[in-house]
Amino acid sequence: MGLAGDSPYDFGEIKPDDLDKSITKFQNILSNCIKDLETDGEEIIKLVKTLILTQSPGERTVEFIEEYLKKISNLSNTEALNVSRVLSHLLNLINVAEQHHLVRSVRESFLNNEDDLKYSCENTIQQLLNQGLDKESVYNALIQQKIELVLTAHPTQIMRRTIISKNSAMGEALSSLDNQQLTMFEREDYEKRLIREVGGSWLTDEVRRSKVTVEMEAQGGFSVIEQTLWHALPKFIKILNRCCVKYLGKELPPTFANIHVASWVGGDRDGNHNVTAEVTRQVSYFSRWIAATLYYKEIDALLFELSMVRHNKTLEELARHSIEKRSGTVKLRYLTTLYKEFKEGIPSKECYRIVMAELRDKMLLTKRKYEDLIAGKSDIQYLPGETFENADEILQVLQVCYDSLVEVGAKEVADGRLLDNIRRLKSFGLTLSKMDIRQESTRHSDVINCVTEYLGLGTYNDWDEPKKQSFLIGELESKRPLIPHDLPCSNEVREVLDTFKVAASLPNGSLGAYVISMCRNPSDILAVHLLQKAVGNKNPQRVVPLFETAADLDSSPKTMEELFLQQWYLKSINGEQEIMLGYSDSAKDSGRFMSCWELFKAQERLASLTEKFNVKLTLFHGRGGTAARGGGNSHEGIMSQPGGSLKSASTRVTIQGEMIDSHYGQIGASIRNFELFTTALLKQSLTPPPPPKQRWREIMEQLSITSCKKYRSIVRENPSFIQYFRTSTVQPEMVYLNIGSRPAKRIAAKSFGLEHLRAIPWVFSFSQNRLNLPVWLGIEDAILEAKTKGWESDINEMYKEWPFFSSTIDLVEMVLLKTDPQISSRYNQMLVPTEIQPLGVEMIDELTKTTNAILELTKHKTLQQDNKILQHFVSIRRTFMDPINYIQVETLKRLRSTQKPDGTNDDADPILIDTLIITFNGISAGMKNTG
């Protein structure tokens, strides 16, 4: 590999900082715990110390690696398991320390000079004002924002929820230890808490032994909202409000909340038969029950907090009505007696408490109602008005209380817990997170087809597109019912119809968008509108087409224009259209470069089209965790979008798998990510980037075609590639992972093909063997073509001046930083049949050439040269992650040696299976964005 410093993966000397101190603390705690808890703990720690790789990649000579691999090969199955466990736990603890370090760094920036913190609210607003924008324009752009984070059930979170919970506790303890005012006894308590959590984590089975259900996924998603987002949101808005007062001269409205949360958990049925209509109903009830529980606690606290007797006339009148309602309702009179403080009633002067008591008691009944519905006790009746159905019912009362406090001079009191909950209600509503429903387009076509055949109208699926549209529009405009009650149909059709019926039955505000995956034609969108009408949905969901493949992205403006030309459709959307863009399938279909370019062009054309028809556009970005699925820095992702695509100041984005806990697992991290989204959207809506030069477009068009051609020549056209993929990666062994309710393949297929494989296992598998092929394959060919055709100065200019191009290249460079040709070669040598190994050698050679090409373009000597923090993180992680990779290769070799020709492995050693799963955990923790 050459001398140290010769490798693009070698970063030179990195000065230790507080992060290293935290990691050393965790290492010592874990080592001591293992020594205390395991009979052979001393031997385990000694063995681990002989296998960690402190050498940089450039120092790992051929001779060094040969000796090292002998150690790995000589490990017994039990030793391999123990070492993997220790290293995996260390990487998990390192991630806890990293997240804490990032939050601490932000806090220190605020303490030292908050105006200079990159992408902060202060820094961004100052920049905009310095560019000549007036205060009113900035303020108006801010209050118009709507950012919706959509938590998905995509199975990329390897870690068990139990371990994640312990990680949160460790992060809190680390934060507390930063407090210099702690007494000796307090510090000792937090140190002991760290030891308890690390020891408890070690004693916890990190292997998920049972298949994840949709309900379990829901609990995981809701726990993040309950434990962090619930607290982070009002804190963030207070930070933003302070900036508005300081620089714009006015406060944000009390009801301002630019961050909203939605969820796909329980609603995403695309290819997942486990998500049934009944599951959707239950998850929706569960969401409302958690929300009611949280609001009940908050309102109960307000009841005791708002003891003031000064109030305005409006509140006095509201309190009088509240007393009248309570005296006339047995159930509410009974609830008051549950609180000994108010057994004799609330004094009439305490109007705030009187109205809060009514809210609290009604919220308690709301909570009980959903407990009953979840338990299946549908026979218990609640009268109209006894429970809350929508957030406005509570908001109106809280707003009256707020206005009253402000009027009597108690604004500081009003701006406390009361204001926090007004904003929570605006953000979370009474559902905690609105549920999107997602279904594949042909499932709707099959329902319509079933109806037309039964009614003797013909075979809908055989009709051409104009005939389909004519029929659908006709039925949408008709008043007659379409679907007979006794329609004979298959179970699949019945399930789709049941889903629409459940959606129609849920309380208003429970659901968000209805997303149509694999949407290709206007009829796919009209079909969903018709099915909502056919089941009598009085509050239909907004229908959102999802354009996924490169071809669908290219044709999406034409599809939408056909709809906008339909009088019925344009009237039905009421001037607003949401469109979802798929990053995963487009990248799997055509490679990263073409996918990015097609997405960019689609956004431009859709923005232009909606402006032509005077329709407000909201783009919904279906991003994953890794760059191959649209992941990356959220701020730069927004800033790299074409100018005009965010004119509405509204955006939605999926937050998937491990990214949920990585970005929103701690309150401080959540606040920072809210800030990154807010400031990027503010800048994009006020100072959008200019359109790229025509020459840049022409070059990018050619580069994307060249890149796609190379990508497909390997992935689609090389007859050996599928076997290479399946043997060089962990893809076949992912069956041992219980990480999600969704199948790894969209449909059950007799033969294996990439077209059936979901994007997540495709990307995950290549991240495990450190090749990360889906991100970079084809890019070197594109850059080489630019040089050959004399475009080198052009692409250098594009990198410096075009946010889209620079963001794309920088993201690829970040992923290359996490690759390792030496480790990927080991997978190829040990696991791939000899006759196919040359393809693996070719891919690793392509990786090296791509790395060199990217470095030449960015003018860097090492990968991510300007991002010293990330280089520091990676240099720490690979010390512990690289040995796990080598153990994983050895484990796969041993497992596959007992495998039968049909792929079954009845003789597999359970220890090897556990070791393999733990290596999945460890490498995922080290890579951080895996799917």
Image (tube, rainbow, N blue to C red):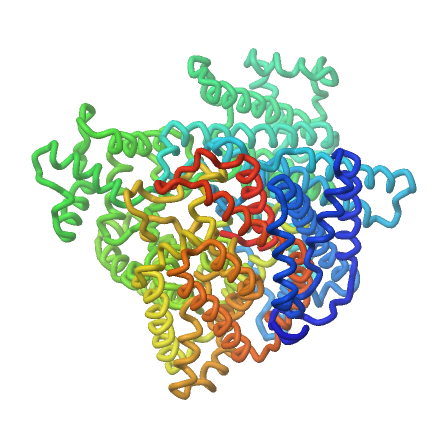
Q: Nearer the viewer, residue 645 or 902?
A: 902
Which residue sits at x=79%, y=35%? 36
Image location (x, y in percent) of residue 597: 39, 68
| 218 w.r.t. 924: above or below | above
Image location (x, y in percent) of residue 433: 50, 39
Image location (x, y in percent) of residue 413: 73, 40
| 455 w.r.t. 849: above or below | above
Tell me if 756 is positioned left or right of 421 in this view.
Answer: left
Which residue extends farthest right?
Answer: 184
Q: How many marks?
A: 0
- Based on the displayed image, in which of its 4 quarters is residue 16 positioned? bottom right
- Based on the displayed image, in which of its 4 quarters is residue 428 positioned? top right
Tell me if 828 is positioned left or right of 304 in this view.
Answer: left
- Whether residue 245 is visible to the viewer of this picture, yes or no, is no
Which residue sits at x=51%, y=27%? 388
Tell me if 454 is positioned left or right of 748 in this view.
Answer: left
Which residue sits at x=26%, y=54%? 520
Which residue sits at x=69%, y=33%? 203
- Whether residue 912 is visible to the viewer of this picture, yes or no, is yes
